[in-house]
Image (spheres, helix red, strand yellow):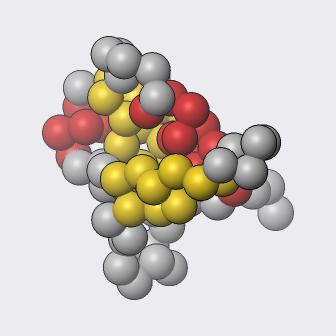
């Protein structure tokens, strides 16, 4: 499944990490314009205290065009 997640906050990264763990998912992340440089990886810590480094795939126009699902993980003001 092709999935684009919009929002690099706690909820967006939580979805990203969990969805990328499932085989068959192609997951990319769209960060806000306030992010100067998108990190190429992040360190995630699970509920058991184990840390896992995960590569981050920034989204492209092609990812949006091929997306089966787009998750909007944004704050409401």
Looking at the image, residue 37 lies above or below residue 76: below
In percent of width and height, residue 42 lies at: 47, 62
Looking at the image, residue 19 lies above or below residue 37: above
Q: Nearer the viewer, residue 54 or 13?
A: 54
Which quarter of the picture shows residue 8? bottom right
- Taking the image as shown, residue 37 lies to the left or right of residue 18, namely left
Q: In the rendered image, which quarter contains the N terminus?
A: top left
At horizontal 36% and vertical 79% (from top left) the residue drawn is 37
Query: Can residue 11 be seen in this snapshot?
Result: no
In percent of width and height, residue 29 lies at: 41, 49
Q: Nearer the viewer, residue 61 or 13?
A: 13
Which quarter of the picture shows residue 66? top left
Looking at the image, residue 39 lies above or below residue 27: below
At horizontal 50% and vertical 79% (from top left) the residue drawn is 34
Number of marks in the rendered image? 0
At horizontal 23% and vertical 49% (from top left) the residue drawn is 60
- Taking the image as shown, residue 52 lies to the left or right of residue 61, namely right
């Amino acid at each position: 499944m092709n999935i684009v997640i919009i929002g690099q906050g706690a909820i967006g990264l939580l979805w990203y990490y969990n969805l990328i763990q499932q085989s068959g998912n192609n997951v990319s992340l769209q960060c806000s314009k306030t992010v100067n440089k998108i990190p190429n990886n992040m360190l995630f810590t699970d509920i058991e205290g184990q840390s896992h480094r995960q590569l981050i795939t920034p989204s492209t126009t092609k990812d949006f065009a091929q997306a089966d699902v787009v998750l909007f993980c944004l704050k409401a003001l």
